[in-house]
Amino acid sequence: MRQIVLDTETTGLEVSQGHRIIEIGCVEIQNRRLTGRHFHRYIDPQRDIDPGAIEVHGITREFLADKPVFAAVAEDFLKFVDGAELIIHNAPFDVGFLDHELSLVDGSFSGLADHCEVTDSLLMARDKHPGQRNSLDALCQRYAVDNSGRELHGALLDAEILADVYLVMTGGQTLLALGANDDSSTRQNRESSESREIDRPAVLRVISATPEEAGAHEEMLRKMAEGGTQPLWSTEH
């Protein structure tokens, strides 16, 4: 099964206020293994970025000045995610922005949900850990996923971290991420141990030795003693 773990960064919090996407980061999972394939683009939003948003992701308008607009990356993005299951933390936020951007490129665009299955990992975490904090940072701490490089939010970095969290949260995995050599921020050779539940009977069955077996055992201990060796488990010790 092909899955894409996705994250975005934006100029602000509300599409209704004209805010735009400035970064898209995606990593690919195939049959519960990170393949090393990823999609990553910075995007010129053609508008200012809220100061509060810059405090979160550190991306400035000046940095994005020479980056492509969303329309220039839309086709490549859709090709990368088409037919996959999208894993997104707080999916309505990212999907809302992506649907808006794609509709600006093509007014007839019906929505990502018609091209991909969308899974909200935040809802999964809330169902699995009700009443607890389920932010990405909290899940990293809960599942011992290393997020030490996450001083600021970044779409590709957060997608990579969420992929690790998702795989552990949904049953564990062991892998080597290979082939992502065109972006220094893509982590390789990540490995985590697989966790499995072992079924055990509620009451352990005790099997006692038969009289014949007990007699043979005692005879062996007697012969050992005659040879000068007193077994530690002998009843006469």
Image (cartoon, rainbow, N blue to C red):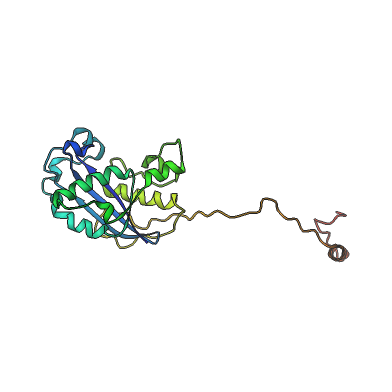
Residue 160 in view here: yes
Left or right: where 140 falls relative to 199: left
Residue 126 at x, y percent in the picture = 42, 41
Residue 188 at x, y percent in the picture = 34, 57
Closer to the camera, 123 or 203? 123
Left or right: where 138 falls relative to 220: left
Residue in view at x 20 percent, y 41 percent: 59
> Is 11 above or below relative to 107?
above
Q: Quadrant of the N terminus?
A: bottom left
Residue 97 at x, y percent in the picture = 22, 44
Residue in view at x 66 percent, y 53 percent: 201
Closer to the camera, 189 or 164? 164
Left or right: where 101 falls relative to 87: left
Left or right: where 39 falls relative to 199: left
Residue 141 in view here: no
Residue in view at x 22 percent, y 52 percent: 110
Occupied quadrant, residue 79: bottom left
Occupied quadrant, residue 28: bottom left
Q: Quadrant of the C terminus?
A: bottom right
Closer to the camera, 19 or 54? 19
Residue 141 at x, y percent in the picture = 42, 42
> Is 233 above or below relative to 61?
below
Occupied quadrant, residue 19: top left
What is the total number of numbered labels drawn onto the structure image? 0
Closer to the camera, 217 or 6? 6
